Image: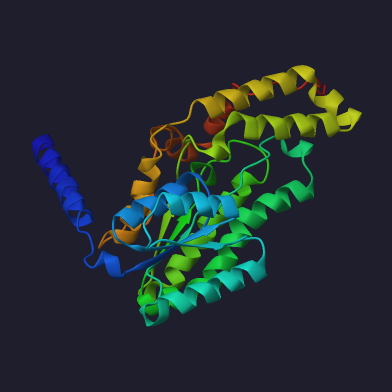
Amino acid sequence: MWLLLLVFVGLLLLYRWYRQSHILENLSDKYVFITGCDSGFGNLLAKQLDKRGMKVLAACLTEKGAENLKKEASSRLRTVMLDVTDSGSVSSAAKWATDIVGDAGLWGLVNNAGFGVPLSPNAWQTKAHFAKVLNVNLLGPFDVTVHFLPLTIKARGRIVNVCSALGRLAAVGGGYCPSKFGAEAFSDSLRRELRDFGVKVSIIEPGAFKTPMSSSENHVKPVEQLWSNLPSQIKDLYGEQYYHKYVQNILQLTENTSLNVHYVTDCMEHALTAVHPWTRYSPGLDTKLFYIPMSYLPTVLSDYLLCRSSPKPAYHPR
């Protein structure tokens, strides 16, 4: 009985591998538009797809980012300035892409641009802090997708949304987790909506990888600023010990990041080039072994495991 079960599971895994190993032909004819190409995942993906011979349209936030990328890529790769929080900028980039791709349409749209600070207790933040993150990580991808959708439908192409393991498990405060939970929901509804158009939507859920956005300096400084600007009443509730322990946790989180950034871009590439792309990709051992399993645990158990290493506030109500 057990032997038959093992054989069945083995054959199932073999079939799954074989099905996912089929790669599309004529990749050199396909256009891909990627947001957030100044650095990190977007930058690496743009160069990776360029080496595969695909026609990459790389959107950068800064002129410097665009110039540096062009130095490391072939003449096929083109860049455009894009601020995903500015609808005028999005509309202009969509028009630019439309003039380039023409009747071929847009095979791939990768919503990669992201913003992740500050990560702190919710009570330390304001509505403006949340709004900034949501504008980049949720409303921005929505705006970009809507503007580029006619081009993607024309090509019966792919949409790849970069979400996060923290879009499955809200392990930190601030706007980042809500924005990624929202991006997951947006992606799910979009996948079902576009199914009859022949457009496939994939979600990338990376864990902690070594990118400029994950550097300790980028996270610790905003937390320090938040703490220094807090009203004394809130500071008294949490206490200095809480603040210092929270900073230590942030440092530990940002230092324990994977250097294998290509794990993420390999998933993006597969989503764009495979005959049968997956709906969800979860690069990183922390995603596979911690965040996703933890998200399925009973609430009382996941809360205990997540809170046991958290700092304790100075104020304890009686």
Q: Is residue 108 above or below residue 137?
A: below
Q: Residue at x 29, y 70 (%)?
A: 29
Outermost residue on the right side: it is 232
- Residue 109: tell me if it is visible: no
Q: What number of labels is visible?
A: 0
- Colouring style: rainbow
Judging depth in this view, the residue of 141 and 45 nearest the camera is: 45
Q: Quadrant of residue 261?
A: top left
Q: Is residue 232 above or below residue 47?
A: above
Q: Position of residue 64 (x, y in %)?
A: 57, 50
Q: Position of residue 269 (x, y in %)?
A: 34, 54
> In this image, 72 relative to 238: left or right?
left
Q: Position of residue 228 (x, y in %)?
A: 83, 29
Judging depth in this view, the residue of 220 and 124 nearest the camera is: 220
Quarter of the rendering occupied by the C terminus? top right
Judging depth in this view, the residue of 293 and 124 nearest the camera is: 124
- Residue 226: tell me if it is visible: yes
Q: Quadrant of residue 243?
A: top right
Q: Quadrant of residue 234?
A: top right
Q: Residue at x 78, y 34 (%)?
A: 226
Q: Position of residue 219 (x, y in %)?
A: 64, 33
Q: Is residue 217 above or below residue 39?
A: above
Q: Residue at x 90, y 28 (%)?
A: 232
